[in-house]
């Protein structure tokens, strides 16, 4: 599991496409794709908005 899996899972649970999540967090769709495939990580300044958009908290976002 981990961050990449949690982002993907929470995004799908929230009913968002990668593009919709990207728009709400202020990044590109390809950035979200990289996060979800563990080829990149969100910048720390994006984490609060990411957690809020996915209806979760930072602890759950990083939970293994």
Image (tube, rainbow, N blue to C red):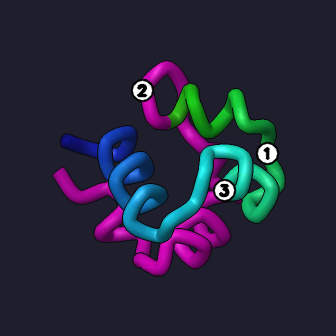
Q: Is residue 60 magenta?
A: yes
Q: Which mark is residue 27?
A: 1
Tags 2 and 1 in contact by the CB under 8 Å rule? Answer: no
- Quick one: label 2, few (<14), some, or many (20+) residues within 10 Å? few
Residue sitting nearer the eye, 59 or 17: 17
Range of magenta residues: 36-64
Q: Which residue is mark 3?
A: 21
Disc on the earlier residue, 3 or 2: 3
Q: Which x, y percent locates residue 7?
A: 43, 51
Residue sitting nearer the eye, 48 or 21: 21
Secondary structure found at label 1: loop
Q: Which residue is mark 2?
A: 38
At 47% across and 58% down in the image, what residue appears?
11
Disc on the earlier residue, 2 or 1: 1
Tags 3 and 2 in contact by the CB under 8 Å rule? Answer: no
Is residue 52 placed above or below 12 in the rendered structure? below
Tags 1 and 3 in contact by the CB under 8 Å rule? Answer: no
Q: CA distance from mark 2 to mark 1?
A: 16 Å
- Image quarter of residue 4: top left
Q: CA distance from mark 1 to mark 3?
A: 8 Å
Residue sitting nearer the eye, 61 or 54: 54
Is residue 60 placed above or below 35 in the rendered structure? below
Secondary structure found at label 3: helix
At 42% across and 26% down in the image, what residue appears?
38
Instruction: Name the outermost residue toward the top.
Output: 39
Q: Is residue 53 magenta?
A: yes
Q: CA distance from mark 3 to mark 2?
A: 16 Å
């Amino acid at each position: 599991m981990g961050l990449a899996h949690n982002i993907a899972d929470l995004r799908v649970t929230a009913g968002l496409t990668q593009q919709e999540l990207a728009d709400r967090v202020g990044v590109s769709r390809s950035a979200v794709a990289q996060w979800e495939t563990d080829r990149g990580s969100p910048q720390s300044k994006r984490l609060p908005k990411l957690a809020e958009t996915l209806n979760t908290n930072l602890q759950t976002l990083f939970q293994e």
